[in-house]
Amino acid sequence: MLFTVDHITNGLHLMVSKKAVAAATQSKKQKTARQALEQDPHAVRVPGERQLEVAIGHEIRALRKHAGITVADLAEESGISIGMLSKIENGLTSPSLTTLNAVSQALGIPMSQLLRRFEEDRQAVQVKSGEGVTAERRGSRAGHQYQLLGVLGPNQSGVVMEPYMITLNTESDVFPTFQHEGLEYLYFLEGRVEYRHGQNTYLMEPGDSLFFDADAPHGPHKLLELPARYLSIITYPKSSSYQGAAEVGE
């Protein structure tokens, strides 16, 4: 078959078009991911930052938003200018005790509460390899192991997170269906499993992840290659009725 200049030109145009579509799709995915993040997960506090001022500012902003009032509303109630309140909330200035007293009175709280974030201990939990706590879950049985990898105590995030390492060693034709409040993230480390979420099934292999609304029925559908091992992270609001490991989780 003879190729003309037109054939070659059209082929090049098609290749360029496909690359342009792929680049546009990738750009759209990146833009969507950036829009989904409300804060920079890689933000780093530089040395010498005003940590006390930042903590006070964050607390004032959180209390103001919880009260459902704007900066202008708080400025009018406290007698402090909008510009000064903006600087305080962003940790850019050191407010005087008189200013903090005016803000706390306007918010209807004791002034000491504005220091809560600065004084609060920030927890961290390390679990060494193989030392996770074996959790009894609905669906736990011989060959199906659930290891809880750590739990933080009370914190100000408003979110509870339960990380599990799940290992499936035994074939089974019947699996429990999980359904609970919150979100769940799976990351597969070993094996091959068909995982069901709602009406869809997903082939999960090492390196694959699945992020979903846990209020839809979900769970392993078929065990294709054992052993299968994956990380499961469940998150739900602190005020949720979901009881985690003691009740229904993964």
Image (cartoon, rainbow, N blue to C red):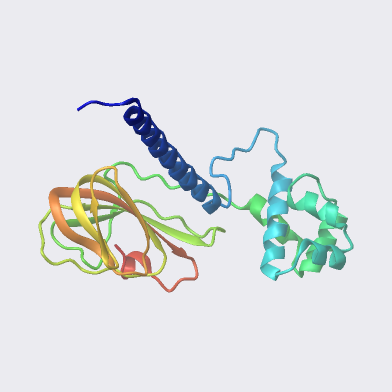
Quarter holding the C terminus is bottom left
Regarding residue 222, the answer to whether it shows in the image is yes
Residue 31 locus on image (x, y percent): 52, 46
- Is residue 1 or residue 170 the one in the foreground? 1
Q: Position of residue 220 (x, y in %)?
A: 21, 60
Residue at the spot 74% in from the left edge and 47% down from the top edge: 91
Q: Residue at x 81, y 55 (%)?
A: 85
Query: Left or right: where does residue 85 sit relative to residue 38?
Result: right
Q: Report whether 35 appears left or right of 24.
A: right
Choose between 186 and 4: the one closer to the eye.
4
In this rendering, would 28 be left or right of 224? right
Q: Position of residue 103 (x, y in %)?
A: 81, 62
Q: Quadrant of residue 236?
A: bottom left
Quadrant housing the N terminus: top left
Q: Residue at x 40, y 61 (%)?
A: 183
Q: Is residue 208 above or below residue 175?
A: above
In the picture shown, does residue 191 fall above or below 170?
above
Q: Going 53% across and 44% down the picture, which residue do you hit?
A: 41
* Relative side of 10 to 88, left or right: left
Rendering quarter of residue 67 = bottom right
Q: Residue furthest bottom?
A: 241
On the image, the x and y values in percent for residue 207 come to 29, 42
| One can see residue 123 in this view | no
